[in-house]
Amino acid sequence: MPDVNWIAFSSALVFSMQAGFACLESGLVRSKNSINFATKNLTDLCVSGVIFWVFGYALMFGASYRGWFGTSSFCLIPTRRR
């Protein structure tokens, strides 16, 4: 269970960091261009979520290869354990 707590806490930090970047970037440009940065941040969130779904979970929690990285459960498809 500590793994889930750590990932939830880290995710909350990343989400708040994205909000901070949105505020910083929208303050540095003209108001007519603020929506471009909001769209960029939303796209960044969606793309990184898909990449985590495809690769990240398996690399973190898949069956370990010599203790370095996971080699199963890509795209969250469970594999049978023997």
Image (spheres, rainbow, N blue to C red):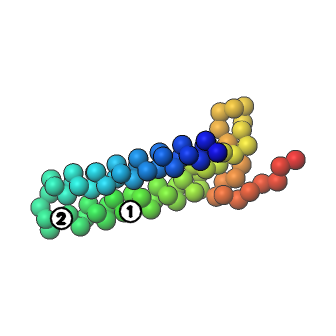
Per the model, the C-alpha gap separating discs 2 and 1 is 16 Å
Decide which of 70, 16 is in the foreground and name it. Answer: 16
Which residue bears the numbered disc 2?
33
Q: Please give the label number shown on residue 72.
A: none
In the rendered structure, the answer to whether residue 36 lies left or right of residue 4 reads left
Answer with the quarter of the image where residue 54 lies: bottom right
- Label 2 residue SS: helix
Classify mark 1: helix, strand or loop: helix
Report the amino acid beneath label 1: Thr
Within 10 angstroms of label 2, few (less than 14), some, or many (20 or more) residues?
A: few
Q: Residue at x 32, y 61 (%)?
A: 40
Task: Give residue 79's quadrant in the image.
Answer: bottom right
The residue at the point 72 percent across, 31 percent down is 66
Q: Is residue 2 visible?
A: yes
Residue 45, how many percent across, how many down?
A: 42, 58
* Visible residue check, residue 59: no
Type of residue at label 2? Asn
Residue at image position (36%, 63%) is: 42
Relative image position of residue 10 (x, y in whole percent): 47, 45
Residue located at (87% from left, 47% from top): 82
Q: Which is nearer the N-term, disc 2 or disc 1? A: 2
- x, y percentage for residue 72? 71, 49
Q: Is residue 63 above or below residue 74?
A: above
Badge number at residue 43: 1
The correct choice, above or below, for 3 with respect to 68 in the image is below
